[in-house]
Image (cartoon, rainbow, N blue to C red):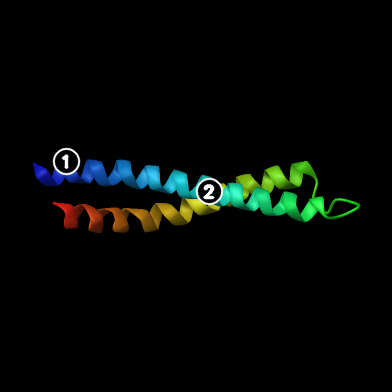
Amino acid sequence: MEEIVMKGKVGKYSLIASVVSSVALSVVSVLLAVLKNSGMVEPLYTQVDIAAGAVFVFILSMIISASIWPNIVEKRLKRIV
């Protein structure tokens, strides 16, 4: 019974960690693109490029973090319990 409860916690915490880390990486990529554009006379990236890049970074980081975070969360939960 305890293992079922822990699996539910691992899934919930892994999803939260994946979303938070993906949003953080997307924000960093947008900030870097805006910073790069602000110093130029003619912008290197359009707003559509920046938005599409943020979506692309979010999707890729979700795919990668969905495979990384469950192991990390499971190890942390086992250490606590």
Q: Relative to 26, is 5 on the left or the right?
A: left
Label whose residue precedes the other's in the sequence (1 or 2): 1
Q: Relative to 80, is 54 on the left or the right?
A: right
Quarter of the picture containing the N terminus is top left
Q: Which mark is residue 5?
A: 1
How many neighbours does mark 2 have within 10 angstroms: few (below 14), some (14-19), or many (20 or more)? some
Q: In this view, which residue lies farthest toward the left? A: 1
- At 60% from the left and 47% from the top, the residue drawn is 27
What element does badge 1 sit on?
helix
**Is the residue under label 2 in contact with that under label 1 (CB below 8 Å)?**
no
**Residue 26, horizontal then vertical, whole percent:** 58, 48
- At 31% from the left and 58% from the top, the residue drawn is 72
Who is closer to the viewer here, 4 or 32?
32
In this picture, is 30 found above or below 64? above
What element does badge 2 sit on?
helix
**Residue 32, horizontal then vertical, whole percent:** 68, 54
Looking at the picture, which amino acid does disc 1 mark? Val
- At 36% from the left and 54% from the top, the residue drawn is 69
Q: Relative to 5, is 36 on the left or the right?
A: right
Mark 1–mark 2 distance (CA, rounded to whole Å): 29 Å
Q: Which mark is residue 24?
A: 2
In this picture, is 3 found above or below 67? above
| Image quadrant assignment for residue 76 | bottom left
